[in-house]
Image (cartoon, helix red, strand yellow):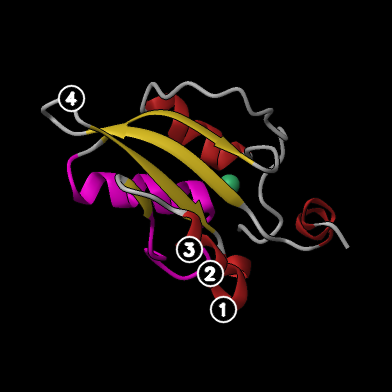
Amino acid sequence: MEVGDWLKSNKSTISVAVAEDSKGKSYTLVGINRSVGKDEKVKAALLKVVSKNEIVVPMQGEGLHAKENIYDFAKTFGLTVKSIDANRPLCVDCNTIRKQNLTTTSTNTSNQKSKKRR
Ligand SMILES: [Zn+2]
């Protein structure tokens, strides 16, 4: 199986964002969701490929989407998320957060609420 097919076949979301600190220094934030977080092999693989100024964002809370993990992490460290993309369409909730933060994206939106959300 190719890794792209593997990504489609499960609920894994990996999101990549470019964020800036108050001095304009930029960082790449790699966000993951719970499915990726649980998969030690994938996590290990991700940690191997990140380079300087790239951060695999730790899970910020139970059940958060990859994008939400990025925004929570960015907020904690006073970073501004400039652009964000993901391997699957942004749900309504994540897209709302994106708009509030004036973040650009080239990822489609699903126009759907996450099924797991109340
Ligand atoms: Zn979402």
Give, as a single range, the part of the protein colored magenta.
56-78
Pointer 1 or 4: first along the chain:
4
Residue drawn at 71 percent across, 56 percent down: 115
Please indicate whether residue 58 sits to the left or right of residue 8 in the image. left
Category of crowding for the residue at label 3, using alpha-carbon neighbours closer than 10 angstroms: few (below 14), some (14–19), many (at least 20):
few
Residue drawn at 63 percent across, 38 percent down: 90
Q: Whole-Å distance between the Cαs marked 4 and 3? A: 26 Å
Category of crowding for the residue at label 2, using alpha-carbon neighbours closer than 10 angstroms: few (below 14), some (14–19), many (at least 20):
some
Residue extending farthest left: 23
Q: Whole-Å distance between the Cαs marked 4 and 2? A: 29 Å
Res 48 label: 3
SS of the residue under disc 3: helix
Disc 4 vs disc 3: Cβ atoms closer than 8 Å? no
Q: Whole-Å distance between the Cαs marked 1 and 3? A: 12 Å
Res 43 label: 2
Pointer 4 or 2: first along the chain:
4
Q: Mark 1 highlights which residue?
A: 40
- Label 1 beta carbon less than 8 Å to ligand 1: no
Residue 39 appears in view:
no
Q: Nearer the viewer, mark 4 or mark 3?
A: 3
Amino acid type of the residue tagged 1 in the rendering? Glu
Pointer 3 or 2: first along the chain:
2
Residue 35 horizontal/vertical position (percent): 63, 68
Amino acid type of the residue tagged 2 in the rendering? Lys
Quadrant in which the C terminus appears: bottom right
Amino acid type of the residue tagged 3 in the rendering? Lys
Residue drawn at 69 percent across, 37 percent down: 89
How many numbered callouts?
4
Q: Mark 4 highlights which residue?
A: 24
